[in-house]
Image (spheres, rainbow, N blue to C red):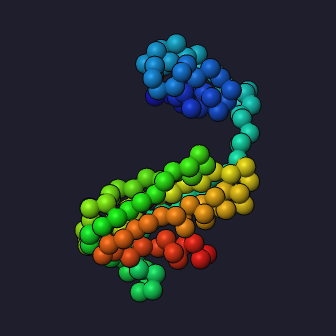
């Protein structure tokens, strides 16, 4: 797929994006090529920071841990969202990748994004047999 047909790329360069993925095929068929060197890209509207949530024990050299997850709780907010590959009642296998979550935060400045993610990390509840890097990351 040529880059000029991707709705997000078109939007970044100020072109009509055709409504996004909902009408992807129609957009691809109707989109007109444009020269990337002749159009201005959009300026960023803020900053985004991310934290990987892992089942590693910071007090034991970040050794991966496995086991049951009794509870995992996180509430997204307008400027903070997260994705987890495990849910309450699930578990992390001892031979699996230790990363099981990602938290993202937006702010108009980098420091605002960092403040948003710090506050969000303090609200994450992870209970079970695993250790995580959440408290360690908050203390950074």
Image spot of residue 54 (x, y percent): 42, 68
Tag count in the figure? 0
Camera-nearest residue between 76 and 48: 76
**Relative side of 110 to 139, left or right:** right
Residue 27 vertical position relative to residue 44 in the rendered view, above or below: above
Left or right of 26? Residue 97 is left
Looking at the image, which residue sits at the far bottom? 60
User: Which residue is located at x 50 percent, y 18 percent?
Assistant: 27
Extreme-top residue of the structure: 30
Residue depicted at x 52% and y 77%: 136
Q: Which of 101 and 39 is in front in this view?
A: 101
Give whichever of 115, 102 is nearer the camera.
115
Residue 138 place in picture, x, y as percent: 57, 72
Q: Whole-percent x and y of residue 56? A: 40, 75
User: Viewed as shown, does residue 84 lie left or right of 108?
Assistant: left
Q: Quadrant of residue 64?
A: bottom left
Residue 126, image x, y percentages: 40, 68
The image quadrant where one finds the C terminus is: bottom right
Q: Which residue is at a point 38% across and 62% down the rendered structure image?
A: 72
Location of residue 21 with respect to 82 vertically, above or below: above
In the image, what residue occupies the spot 68% across and 51% down? 107
Look at the picture and state if 35 lies above or below 102.
above
In the picture provided, is 1 more to the left or to the right than 66?
right
């Amino acid at each position: 797929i040529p880059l000029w047909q991707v709705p997000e790329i078109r939007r970044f360069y100020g072109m009509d994006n055709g409504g996004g993925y909902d009408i992807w095929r129609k957009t691809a068929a109707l989109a007109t090529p444009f020269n990337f060197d002749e159009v201005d890209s959009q300026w960023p509207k803020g900053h985004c920071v991310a934290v990987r949530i892992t089942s590693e024990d910071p007090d034991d050299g970040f050794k991966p841990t496995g086991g049951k997850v009794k509870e995992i709780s996180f509430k997204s907010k307008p400027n903070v969202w997260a994705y987890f590959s495990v849910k309450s009642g699930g578990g992390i296998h001892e031979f699996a990748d230790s990363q099981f979550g990602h938290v993202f935060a937006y702010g108009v400045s980098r420091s605002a994004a960092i403040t948003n993610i710090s506050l969000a990390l303090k609200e994450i509840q992870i209970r079970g047999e695993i250790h995580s890097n959440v408290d360690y990351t908050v203390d950074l």
